[in-house]
């Protein structure tokens, strides 16, 4: 699309708004883009795009992967623009492009890295037309927004532009099926020695062959529908990957690509973050960075503290762990991580949706898709459920088999630390995306409690 008067008016107003917000000490990461799109509905289609645009999408992990990629690019001295500090919907992308252009709209940087919301990809991808698009995975998410994973697959299939090169998770049959006519490469984790097959999860969204409907045979199923499968009737199978993590150590992985093997650091050993690290490696290699540079830069990368953070007080651990609100798969991953964490531990749950809790109304059906059963493990010595829906969480935990003597619950989130057993050796605080402030305040309360006890 050509730039017209409507575009220039929207651009100048949004740039002035961005300047004004900065004078006021505000970041201005979403409002300028919102103004631009309000004044010029096809603004994203008219603003000149950088020479190369990279998109990162998927249900879970896209923020973590985008942050890893950007950290590596920073360490390698690559200049780029991104929407790291803003929204991943169309207004956030527009704000990032406005910040990266002059008063005529021409971009200042040749490379753009955008985290893109999968549900609203119809508002961004047809306009920015990424050259490379990474999809981490596709799972069921919030009922009120994402309905069902096949619904998201349909949106992406309709609005990801033809010809865009895709980087897809070979171990996710929904993700790997996207845009069949587009060029693609896959990433995968090979079956590890001693790794047990079989999913313990309630949710299993891929059971039948997408080609003929026969029940799939699984070589390995790690969680939900993540694993390697084949159809005994028609021969359909998980695709072969160009990037394969063949061995996993405590803090590194060996990745095979093109007949060569290279070691890359792991910021976190949990499987979902191994997939995130592998996805970042695949994207960076497709961008043309040599493996040695990637490995060296990833050595200093870490999972964002807004996703996972361990601190110590009084010789004991206090751990912040994101549990994405109303997302049964993300919460199940967090619950399993807690169960698998060594030693005894207590858990504080802030699972209410931030916005719904303000009105005391929330669809709680997702609790029954989430694997609270992981928290019934004997190593979890106490669970504190706090928030407007504390009775609902308490009931779900009882149904999961957690003994009532291990449970405490309160509507007052700020009082969660007060009912915590001070003898706990480690405490996990699980929180929603929008309650990081609450989680940090309670973390400080727990640390103070541990310091006194210590």
Image (cartoon, rainbow, N blue to C red):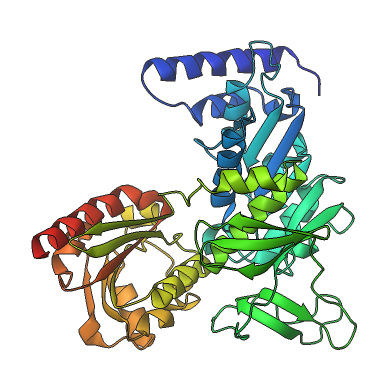
Q: Is residue 88 visible?
A: no
Of the 4 image quadrants, the one containing the N terminus is top right
**Quarter where residue 131 is shown:** top right
Can you give x and y, in whole percent of width and height, for residue 59 in the image? 60, 58
Q: Is residue 174 above or below residue 377?
A: above
Q: Residue furthest left?
A: 452
Q: Does 106 sit above or below residue 277?
A: above
Which quadrant of the rendered structure holds the C terminus? Answer: bottom left
Residue at image location 64% in from the left, 10% down from the top? 103
Q: Which residue: 72% across, 84% down?
A: 218
370 displayed left or right of 252 = left
Q: Position of residue 348 (x, y in %)?
A: 28, 67
Give the image location of residue 265, x and y in percent. Answer: 57, 55
The residue sitting at 74% across, 29% down in the picture is: 45
Looking at the picture, tell me which residue is in the foreground, 251 or 159. 251
Left or right? Give the position of 21 relative to 54: left
């Amino acid at each position: 699309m050509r730039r017209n008067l409507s575009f220039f008016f929207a651009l100048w107003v949004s740039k002035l708004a961005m300047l004004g917000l900065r004078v006021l000490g505000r970041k201005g990461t979403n409002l300028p883009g919102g103004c631009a799109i309000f004044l010029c509905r096809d603004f994203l289609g008219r603003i000149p795009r950088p020479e190369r645009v990279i998109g990162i999408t998927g249900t879970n992990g896209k923020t973590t992967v985008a942050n890893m990629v950007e950290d590596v690019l920073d360490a390698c001295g690559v200049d780029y623009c991104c929407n790291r500090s803003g929204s991943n919907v169309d207004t956030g992308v527009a704000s990032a492009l406005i910040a990266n252009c002059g008063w005529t709209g021409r971009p200042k940087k040749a490379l753009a890295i955008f985290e893109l919301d999968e549900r609203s990809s119809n508002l961004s991808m047809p306009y920015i037309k990424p050259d490379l698009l990474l999809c981490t995975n596709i799972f069921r998410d919030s009922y009120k927004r994402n309905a069902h994973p096949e619904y998201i697959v349909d949106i992406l299939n309709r609005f990801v532009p033809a010809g865009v090169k895709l980087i897809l998770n070979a171990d996710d049959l929904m993700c790997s099926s996207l845009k069949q006519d587009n060029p693609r490469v896959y990433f995968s984790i090979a079956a590890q020695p001693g790794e047990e097959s079989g999913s313990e999860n309630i949710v299993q969204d891929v059971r039948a062959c997408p080609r003929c409907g026969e029940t799939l045979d699984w070589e390995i199923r790690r969680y939900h529908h993540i694993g390697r499968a084949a159809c005994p009737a028609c021969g359909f199978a998980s695709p072969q990957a160009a990037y394969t993590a063949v061995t996993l150590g405590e803090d590194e992985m060996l990745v095979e690509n093109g007949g060569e093997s290279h070691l890359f650091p792991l910021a976190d050993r949990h499987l979902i973050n191994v997939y995130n690290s592998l996805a970042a490696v695949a994207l960076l290699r497709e961008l043309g960075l040599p493996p040695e540079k990637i490995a060296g830069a990833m050595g200093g990368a870490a999972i964002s503290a807004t996703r996972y953070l361990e601190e110590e007080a009084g010789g004991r651990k206090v751990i912040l762990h994101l549990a994405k609100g109303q997302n049964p798969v993300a919460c199940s991953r967090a619950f399993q991580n807690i169960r698998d964490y060594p030693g005894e531990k207590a858990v504080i749950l802030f699972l209410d949706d931030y916005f719904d809790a303000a009105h005391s109304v929330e669809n709680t059906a997702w609790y029954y898709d989430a694997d609270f059963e992981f928290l019934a493990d004997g190593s979890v010595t106490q669970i504190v459920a706090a928030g407007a829906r504390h009775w609902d969480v308490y009931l779900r935990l009882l149904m999961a088999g957690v003994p009532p003597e291990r449970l405490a619950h309160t509507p007052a989130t700020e009082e969660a630390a007060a009912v915590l057993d001070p003898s706990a050796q480690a405490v996990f605080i699980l929180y929603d995306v929008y309650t990081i402030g609450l989680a940090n305040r309670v973390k400080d309360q727990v640390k103070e409690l541990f310091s006194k006890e210590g």
